Amino acid sequence: MQVLSVPRVATVRLFLHVELRCVSRRLRCSMSRAEQRRLALRSKHVSSFIIRRLTMLVPKGVEEALFKRVVDGWIFSAPNPWTFGRRHSYLVNDAQKAELGMRVRRGRYFRIVALIPMFGLPLAAFLVAPSLLRAPSITTWVVFALFVVVASIAMNLCDYLPLRRLLVGLPRTTERIGLVEMHGRQAQAMSVKALATIALIELLACLAVVAQWLTSVRGNPITLVSAAIFGLLGILFLRMLFVRLRTPQSAG
């Protein structure tokens, strides 16, 4: 029986120690990669769940304004990526309508999120430099006009980006959904409570802005523009509410 010498035993022990460390390191790496994959998958599911839940904050039925029933399915009026261009119309089936409707609601939620910085930054600027409101100059009007353009582009992107992938390959159609028809369909799809709540918020905001303008030392035309916007939105939703109440088959 051959007996290993002390140096050879030490060499074998060192070799085994190195091999065990390598195996242990590989196991840790493989476990950490698997754990990372599980965490990434779990985060994706959680993120998707949160978006779906937050999308429920948008009043039910807002997406119906963009769909119109036809013989071959539904006409879907999609936003134009160039914001101020003409809307595109597509022909979709029931399954595609359901998926597009969810994306439309998600876009409306993104609008709500985008409104926070869009209105927060100008408000902070006016608080830091109140002279912009007291004596509006040409520069103030130019900045205000640019803000309206940027806000319009941002709102359109919030609507278009969630739909972009789903629109690829959909057949186009020349049929259109008019603006009045959109509002009528949205009024019939939304609840009376949702329409009344939105109309009340817009009208109260209009009254608050008008009261602020009346109590200020020097009236500001920009304030009146804001009041007019809130007032027009309030009137629009009031009209939609009246349409909803006059529709017997969807009343209640």
Image: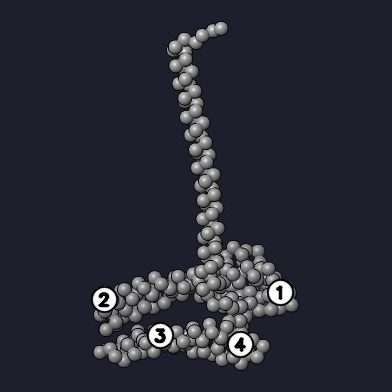
Q: Residue furthest right?
A: 71
Residue 24: where, in percent of width, then height? 49, 33
Point out the tag, 2 or 4, that comes first from the N-terminus. Answer: 2
Residue flagged by tag 4: what amino acid is it?
Gly
Front residue of 15/127: it is 15
Gap in Å between the C-alphas at discs 4 and 3? 27 Å
Is 145 placed above or below 238 here? above
Residue flagged by tag 2: what amino acid is it?
Ala
Mark 2, secondary structure of its residue: loop
Q: Which residue is mark 3?
A: 205
Gap in Å between the C-alphas at discs 2 and 4? 48 Å
Q: Which residue is mark 4?
A: 252
Label of residue 73 in the image: 1
Residue 155: where, in percent of width, then height? 48, 73
Mark 3, secondary structure of its residue: helix
Label of residue 129 in the image: 2
